[in-house]
Amino acid sequence: MPVRATRNSFLMENNPVGRVRWWKIALPVLLGLGLVAWMIARDFDPAIFRHVRFTGHALLFILLAFLFMVGRDLGYIVRIRLFSRGELGWRQAFRIIMLWEFTSAVTPSAIGGTGVAVVFVHKEGLPVGRSAAIVMLTSFFDELYFALIFPIVFFIVGGDRLFAGPMGHELMLFAAIGYGVKLAYLLLLSYGLFFNPLGLRWLIVKLFSLPVLRRWRAGAVRAGADIVRSAVEIRRYRPMFWVKSFAATFLSWSSRYLVANALFMAFFALSDQFLVFARQLAMWIMMLVAPTPGGSGFAEYVFTHFLNDVIPVDASIQVGTAAVIALLWRLVTYYPYLVMGALILPRWLRQSFRRKTQPIENLPSR
């Protein structure tokens, strides 16, 4: 076996996903809950709970919020089955998505779960090349959604309304940086996947050969190889594949943003539902720069101060009310993945990493 292939197998077998520690699960929970508790206590007013009451109407819309999250996961599951051309079953696709989201929840937003997603797919029985292609296509469609939908939403709503409030200028700057990063990544990925994969691999390796980036060169070499494998793989897909994949992507991300709409509707009659949706889209772009695991703390803070003005209550309790809704929002969109990952990961590791590998220095070569 060539040493390059064997080394790749070794890296796949010894991926850092196997070294997840429980404190990495506890940390984002403590950060998020701690900040929300602080914001509620700081702006506490008993009048908040005259508006946020868990009536039958409220529980119905909270259930709708969970159903939107089901739609979000269903879109991802359908998409990954499309990418695998049906070779991944429903249970396998569900397991991959839950592990992927769990990894995203315990790593900074800028990193996410993409770095180890190839392992999740590969360990479900697909070759490394096809696994890399699936992960690359996932990234491509996710960034394509943001690149297309955000400008449309921005021009429909208007920048002044989308980024209103005392922090509007700062939040617009965050969104602009996040969108720029996503657009640049989409263009670079598109160039590598559809036009010149070898050229992009060469550029990545050269870039990470610079002294300041050299410590990440090994990962860059693997990423370049993944792009080349993915480019070969996606040439087999027909036009209808791209239509179905974008439809699944649209279902997934749009369902996630509608969670906030459902939670606001549980307690209030909002005058502009589309504005809430638009701000959710902008918020997820901002979260790209969040340095904490899963954006914990940052997400709750931005939600509270970005969406408080849409709540039809007295201005003196808007922030405190928004903090309560932010807690519910994270309970629906974030904490379930921590629970699912903690339940699935140990068994998945036992089943997927049973085979022992040779130490890398003893690998055979030719």
Image: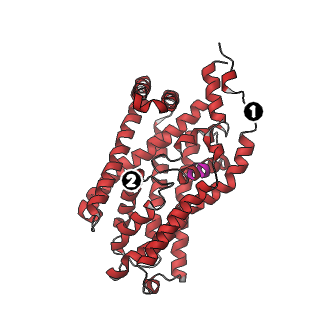
Depth-wise, is mark 1 or mark 2 nearer the camera? 1
Going by the numbered disc 2, the residue's amino acid type is Ile
Write the residue at 35% across / 40% down.
184
Crowding around mark 1 (Cα neighbors within 10 Å: few <14, some 14 to 19, many 20+) is few
Write the residue at 66% across / 23% down.
361
Going by the numbered disc 1, the residue's amino acid type is Lys
Quarter occupied by the C terminus: top right
x then y, percent, for residue 219: 51, 32
Comparing 85 with 22, the one in front is 22
* SS class, disc 2: helix
Instruction: Reply above or below: 308 against 105.
Output: below
Instruction: Reply above or below: 172 against 304.
Output: above
Is 208 magenta? The answer is: no
Q: CA distance from mark 1 to mark 2?
A: 41 Å
Instruction: Reply above or below: 171 against 131.
Output: below
- Asked if one can make out residue 13 in the rendered structure from this viewpoint, the answer is yes
Mark 1 and mark 2 in contact? Answer it, CB < 8 Å.
no
Quarter occupied by the N terminus: top right
**Disc 2 target residue:** 285
Residue farthest along the front direction in this orientation = 211
Residue range corresponding to the magenta coloring = 97-101
Write the residue at 47% across / 51% down.
109
x then y, percent, for residue 251: 48, 55
Write the residue at 53% across / 83% down.
55
Comparing 344 with 71, the one in front is 344
Mark 1 / mark 2, whichever is N-terminal: 2
* SS class, disc 1: loop
Image mark for residue 356: 1
x then y, percent, for residue 135: 53, 39
